[in-house]
Image (cartoon, grey):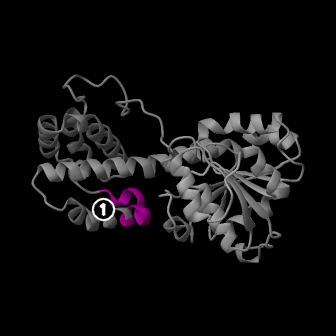
Amino acid sequence: MNATQQPRPARLTVGVVGAGRVGPALAAALQLAGHRPVAVSGVSDASRRRAAALLPDVPLVPPAQVLALADLVLLTVPDDALPGLVEGLAATGAVRPGQLLVHTSGRYGTAVLDPARRAGALPLALHPAMTFTGTAVDVQRLAGCSFGVTAPEELRLAAEALVIEMGGEPEWIAEEARPLYHAALALGANHLVTLVAQAMELLRKAGVEHPDRMLGPLLGAALDNALRSGDAALTGPVARGDAGTVAAHVAELRKHAPGTVAGYLAMARTTADRALAHGLLKPELAEDLLGVLAETGDGAAAPGGPDPDGQGPEDPHGSQGGDR
């Protein structure tokens, strides 16, 4: 059975626990598909404003009351808050047998919902691979958005059907692969934002009045080429083995933006490794280049691999406060 042949779920009452950037948008998408949002909980003033904008006339109530009113409950809180929330809801008897309990964390599969499952809930993990703004534009962006889906086999068709109703494309992710899946998305999306923001700051320092206009066509083409061709799309001084150019870059960054040196070197080392492995960087040119890249931001020899700050992956949703 292909995606277009999935059975439509019965019309459900929908609740949201955590009115951050994600929950109200998903509930609004489900409402467009014919389901009925009936309750939402939120912590911050910003969360309450988002709920009012995307789910007008839906009452704001405590989390336990959301579960009391809804057949399908979206748990859209930050990753670190999710286990405690589930345990608390189960321990207080808020979970009802037969209730669909859906979380949207990329990090977790359905095991994190085990306390609720033991209370009779039906666990689903539906993670939209999309960044969210907390506005109505998010509902439109769900069209064609991939969702990482993890569910018990007997609930797989229901999970995939819900994703399709929200306009998304289901992609099955095994329970044990969820952390790797989420790390990949964070590496691509969150770190891309950091790189683009740094590039715009450097261009401003170089006197470019509209760095966004300059970068837009270049980065759009680079992204398109990378998605189409992978490593074959690599270009620039590292892939060419232009050690002198790279050394000049590092010198300028140390002078004008020292905070960017570690990231530049880390990405350049990784780029050089991949260019070598794919035959783009000629071995005879690599020695001088790797010599330049063997330095850290303070000029000392690098002690290890290209992870200068040891930072872990960030949340691609850009969660804030107590709600996702």
Position above or below: 311 against 22: above
Label 1's element? helix
Relative to residue 19, is residue 296 drawn left or right? left
Position above or below: 155 against 305: below
Residue at image coords 84%, 43%:
117
Relative to residue 182, is residue 161 drawn left or right? right
Is residue 163 inside the magenta stretch? no
Q: Which residue is mark 1?
A: 219
- Counting from the top left corner in percent of width and height, residue 60 is at 67, 53
Is residue 230 inside the magenta stretch? yes
Q: Confirm whether residue 240 shows in the render.
A: no
| Front residue of this view, candidates 202 and 242 | 202
* The residue positioned farthest toward the bottom in the image shown: 4
Relative to residue 104, is residue 157 drawn left or right? right
Q: Which residues are magenta?
A: 224-234
Quadrant location of the N terminus in the rendered image = bottom right
Relative to residue 59, is residue 284 drawn left or right? left
Identify the image quadrant of residue 299: top left
Identify the image quadrant of residue 159: bottom right
Question: Amino acid type of disc 1?
Answer: Leu
Residue at image coords 53%, 56%:
49
Residue at image coords 60%, 35%:
80
| Front residue of this view, candidates 318 and 13 | 13
- Counting from the top left corner in percent of width and height, residue 120 is at 89, 46
- Counting from the top left corner in percent of width and height, residue 68 is at 82, 51
Q: Confirm whether residue 271 shows in the render.
A: yes
Q: Main secondary structure of the magenta part?
A: helix
